[in-house]
DNA sequence: GTTCTATATGAACATCCGTTCATATCCAAG
DNA sequence: CTTGGATATGAACGGATGTTCATATAGAAC
């Protein structure tokens, strides 16, 4: 799984062969089929594991409190969690079209569930009067796209710490939605 | 080129064969090599054409004026241009890793040039005192990720017009960077 | 020490890949 | 009417693909 993850992230699902994955583990291609029924399931399992891990981690991280605090936690959590798993994130966003229709629907449902967590925070803040968002669903998509974007440019060896990035993004998110 | 564009966007570069592209045009695979030296160049040309078109269109669209007005124009332009070319956008973001290193560098340079257009607006607004951004480069990446994100969820048949989407995103961008 | 279960091998399967090239076809220019 | 350049064909190339399976190996359980 780890080898497949790395290779899929680096070269893309379609461009990686079962023989390459096997070679990375030091085994022949046939042996992989003791652990996965086929290549498609391998991809699906990687994505499902990632999305379920994301949802579980957020369940453990989220808290009660006012909408602003909950939004702050979501923003910082999302950035940390995604920056720690660049390969999983990359695959889960890029390889959706290589999923079987039914597998796609399942991953999509998990993603939707995660998005709804943010959307609920925005709607609550709207009701509390602390947020001013014209369209919670659209703002949800905008905020998620923005914070997920860190994975495309952030480098551990770069000039900014994760905390510094969290601060910058939280400031932007807060100002974008505050009443 | 059009057939390759559509197929690459739908199934991914690595998953589409020259024979499929040829069949889409009603021709045999060998005939394609009268128009492109190889498959890699086909992908590269699609991306280069897209990025150059984007830069040209922005050159034609951008104006002088205060930073806020220039940022407004950039935001609205970016959304319109990208929503009108979903296939090109998809390919240009998803298939970067399938480019030869030297081809990648060239596309990356064009992308960087486009990003710099936004970064310059932010820096000018900062100097004018109308913006308050802690890190222009990071905010550039954040804004571009946010507005590019519309392409992942917007549907022409959906409930929102392009103008409505532009209004929502512009409000968010403006509030996120304003002093 | 034998049996059993789990796992690895390596060859084989049919099929597809990108690319080349000799040959054929077409159509405009002279 | 002939020539020549552009373009299409279809077979062929070596090699890679996902997957299967009979066979081999290894170590634990009895």
Image (tube, coloured by chain):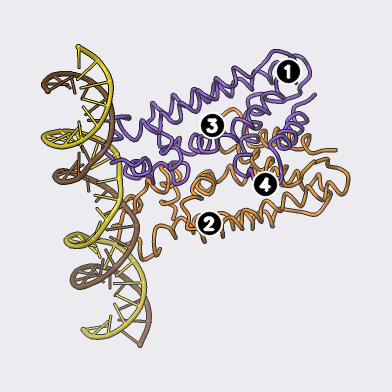
Chain colours: A purple, B orange, C brown, D yellow
| Chain letter belonging to callout 3 | B
Classify C10 as above or below A101: below
Element at label 1 = helix
Asked if the residue under mark 2 is in contact with the one under mark 1, i.e. CB atoms within 8 Å, the reply is no
Q: Nearer the viewer, residue B123 or C11?
A: C11
Looking at the image, is B157 positioned above or below residue B58? above
Asked if the residue at tag 2 contacts the one at tag 4, i.e. Cβ–Cβ closer than 8 Å, the answer is no
Dividing the image into 4 quarters, which one contains the N terminus of chain A? top left
Residue denoted by label 1? A67
Q: Position of residue B94 (x, y in %)?
A: 50, 45
- Marks 4 and 1 sit apart, C-alpha to C-alpha, by 32 Å
- Rounded to the nearest angstrom, the CA distance separating label 1 from label 2 is 43 Å
Horizontal arrangement in the rendering, residue D26 relative to residue C3 (left or right): right
Residue A120 horizontal side relative to residue B95, left or right:
right
Badge 4 is on which residue? A158
Packing grade of label 1 (10 A; few <14, some 14-19, many >=20) is: many
Image marks 4 and 3: residues in contact by CB distance under 8 Å: no
Residue at coordinates 68% horizontally, 28% vertically from top-left? A76
Residue at 45% x, 50% y: name it: B5
Q: Nearer the viewer, mark 4 or mark 2?
A: 4
**Percent of width and height locating residue B141:** 67, 44
Q: Which residue is mark 3?
A: B157
* Of the image marks 4 and 1, the number of the one nearer the N terminus: 1
Q: Is residue B103 left or right of residue B63?
A: left
Residue at 59%, 33% (x, y): give it: A82
Query: Chain for mark 2?
Result: B
Q: Residues within 10 Å of mark 4 (few under 14, many from 20)?
A: few
Picture disc at residue B104: 2
Question: Which is more N-terminal, label 3 or label 2?
Answer: 2
> Which of the numbered marks, if any, corresponds to residue B20?
none
Query: Marks 2 and 3, how far apart in space?
Result: 35 Å
């Amino acid at each position: 799984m780890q080898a497949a993850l790395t290779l899929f992230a680096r070269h893309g699902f379609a461009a990686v062969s079962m023989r390459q994955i096997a070679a990375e583990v030091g085994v022949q291609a046939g042996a992989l089929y003791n652990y996965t029924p086929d290549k498609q399931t391998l991809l699906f399992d990687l994505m499902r594991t990632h999305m379920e891990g994301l949802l579980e981690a957020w369940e453990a991280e989220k808290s009660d409190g006012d909408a602003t605090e909950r939004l702050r936690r979501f923003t910082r959590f999302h950035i940390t969690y995604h920056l720690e798993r660049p390969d999983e994130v990359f695959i889960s966003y890029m390889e959706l079209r290589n999923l079987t229709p039914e597998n796609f629907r399942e991953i999509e449902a998990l993603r939707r569930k995660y998005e709804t967590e943010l959307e609920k925070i925005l709607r609550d803040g709207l009701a509390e009067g602390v947020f001013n968002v014209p369209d919670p669903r659209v703002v949800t998509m905008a905020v998620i796209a923005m914070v997920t974007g860190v994975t495309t440019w952030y480098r551990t060896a770069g000039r900014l710490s994760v905390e510094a990035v969290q601060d910058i993004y939280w400031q932007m998110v807060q100002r974008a939605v505050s009443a």
